[in-house]
Amino acid sequence: MRLINRHPDRAGRLILVILPFALLLFAYFMGSATRLAENPSDKLLPSAIQMADAVKRMAFVADPRSGDYLLWQDSASSLQRLAIGLGISALLGLCLGIAAGILPLCGAPLSPLLTVLSMVPPLA
């Protein structure tokens, strides 16, 4: 059988899916251990224990100055900014789209711009 026609079985597929993540985690923790052995106060690649302590401190311990749980407060603020920006852009896009569709004087300059922008991939 040709190699291109071979498909892994269910267990093999699961191993092949997990393998890249396991290799990345292994490489990260090896690099972290190496850096922390040279400089224990290094912040670039924290160990798993340091990450767990930071999550515990940010999510489950109230800030002594404000009394807020910082992770949840910061997440709520970020989501609020995201919702405001999304709402403004959706409203602006709707208004410009209606104006460009109804009024030829608005559609003429916007049509070439939108044609060029539509060719840009969404993740670019």
Image (tube, grey):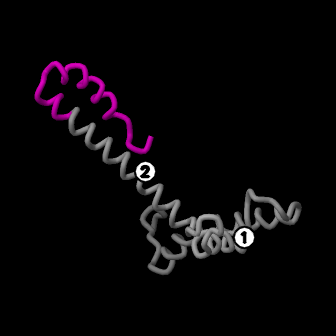
Horizontal placement of 39 versus 4: left or right? Answer: right
- Residue count near mark 2 (Cα–Cα under 10 Å), binned few <14, some 14–19, many ≥20: few
Mark-to-mark CA distance, 1 and 2: 29 Å
List the residue tagged with mark 2.
Answer: 81
Secondary structure at badge 2 equals helix
What residue does disc 1 label? 50
Provide residue 53's location: percent of width, then percent of height: 69, 73
Relative to 11, 40 lies left or right: right
- Give amino acid for label 2: Arg
| 70 in magenta | no
Q: Which residues are magenta?
A: 97-124
Q: Residues within 10 Å of mark 1 (few under 14, many from 20)?
A: few
- Foreground residue, 97 or 23? 97
Quarter of the image holding residue 68?
Answer: bottom right
Where residue 99 appears, as percent x and y from the top left, is 17, 29
Q: For this view, does 109 lie left or right of residue 19?
A: left
Q: Residue furthest bottom?
A: 11
Proximity of marks 1 and 2: CB atoms separated by less than 8 Å: no
User: Which mark is in front, 1 or 2?
Assistant: 2
* Secondary structure, magenta segment, majority class: helix
Q: Residue at x 46, y 61 (%)?
A: 76
Quadrant of image for the C terminus: top left
Q: Nearer the viewer, residue 69 or 15?
A: 69
Task: Identify the residue at image location x=71%, y=64%.
Answer: 27
| Left or right of 17 in this view: 45 | right
> Reading the chain from its start, which is encountered first: label 1 or label 2?
1
Q: Amino acid at mark 1?
A: Gln
Q: Position of residue 5 (x, y in %)?
A: 42, 65
Residue at the (55%, 65%) spot, across then down: 71
Q: Residue 100 at what x, y percent from top left?
A: 18, 28
